[in-house]
Amino acid sequence: MPSPVLGILTLYLNENKYLEEKKIYEKMIEEGEKLGIDVYVFTPSEVNSSKEMIYALMYLPEQKRWIQKWRPFPDLIFDRCRIQRGERFQELLRFRRKYAHLLFLNRPLRNKWTIHQVLNKKAMFRPFLLDTKMYQNSTDVKTMLKSHKLIYMKPINGTGGRGILRIERVAKDPNTLLIQGRDQDRNIISPKRIRSENLSTFLKNCHMGSRYIIQEGVQLKLPNGRVHDYRMLVQKNKNGEWEFTGCAGRIGAERSVTSNLHGGGIAAEMNDLLSKWIADPEKRNDVRDTAKEFGVEVAKYLEKTYGVLCELALDLAIDKNGRIFLIEVNPKPAREVFAKIGQDEVYHQAIIKPLEYSLWLYKQKKK
């Protein structure tokens, strides 16, 4: 059987052709060689549809340099494209439509609101879901604040903490709201206190350019005032089966309402972070086991709903009672959080599992 060719589909982040995950791609290409998989990287702009060829980005590990070379279409495609604004993303959508018949390791998921609705249909997931509503106007926000002291407003297609607002009723004065957040460039918005009757005006001045959800908040501030959560990675293995790969804690930057590493957050061992939150070791073990099982079941269910997937990240909140809440699902997860906490083997597995799965999938299709 000939060696399979895997094309990693990605997007440049700017006009200078910057690739955010270039180091990860280098590692995947190196590991692919060891497994007998020919891996290259490409964006929709490198596709010549008339010739059915791709001006592929190829990494040469021995020379530690990148070159470009015309290549035929790959046997399999690993879609690593995250949502962007502008023409590059529109070009991606056209590529996905035109070449939907090709063999993809993973298909796109839907937005945060749709994912919430889909998961809410299954009774076993409901205890993990936060109260979530679609934002129409400020009345929706005020209604949510009557039920929850703390809420978050999030763009339904946002990534990396962009555009998120945290709104909290002040304990000593319920008619005063404390608002924090990040703008569309991930910059921290200075905390503001406003009267609840001024909320409508405040939200209009935010110029929110996309649809938003309103989500119940979980109190996740550590004693130092920083928020924290957990990033869990579940992936298909070399037998095409879903399994837990790893879970790490994330601690947000000072004054940040999110824990994203790209927004200045830091990584932490899950066990270390959890021990500061839950004193009972047995309870911590139960929490970890429940989270693992939940993550795998979510992945299986979403795959049945939306089509083939190969990996998912689940961002989880865990309260002091050990209850687990799903913050959101990320279909294009980064994996550097494991490297940052020194979990080298987990990091290695996070890189090679999509390759091992692609090899399994290729063999299945050749039978």
Image: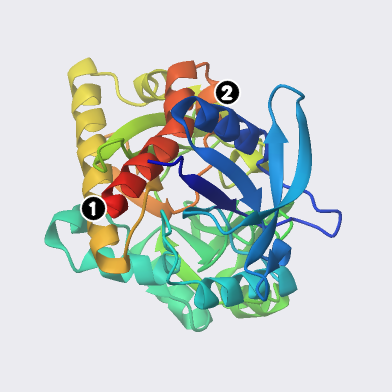
Q: How far apart are marks 1 and 2 (CA)?
A: 28 Å
Rendered-image quadrant of the N terminus? top left
Horizontal and vertical percent for residue 104? 43, 59
Q: Where is residue 367 in the image (x, y as percent from the top left)?
A: 24, 51
Residue named by callout 2: 340
Q: For residue 147, which quarter of the picture? A: bottom left
Could you classify mark 1 by the number of other residues whose Cα lies within 10 Å: few (under 14), some (14-19), or many (20 or more)? some
Q: Which residue ends up furthest to the right in the rendered image?
A: 16
Instruction: Tell me if mark 2 has few (under 14), some (14-19) or many (20+) residues whose alpha carbon lies within 10 angstroms of its own.
Output: some
Element type at marker 1?
helix
Residue flagged by tag 2: what amino acid is it? Lys
Q: Can residue 337 be seen in this view?
A: no
**Amino acid at the residue labelled 1:** Lys
Q: Name the residue under label 1.
A: 300
SS for callout 2: helix
Determine whether 138 is above or below 25 in the image. below
Considering only order in the chain, which callout, 2 or 1, is on the residue closer to the N terminus?
1
Judging depth in this view, the residue of 272 and 254 nearest the camera is 272
Residue at 67 percent across and 60 percent down: it is 54
Left or right: residue 39 versus residue 46 is: left
Q: Which of 56 and 177 is in front in this view?
A: 56
Q: Quadrant for residue 252, please give it.
A: top right
- Left or right side of 246 for 225: right
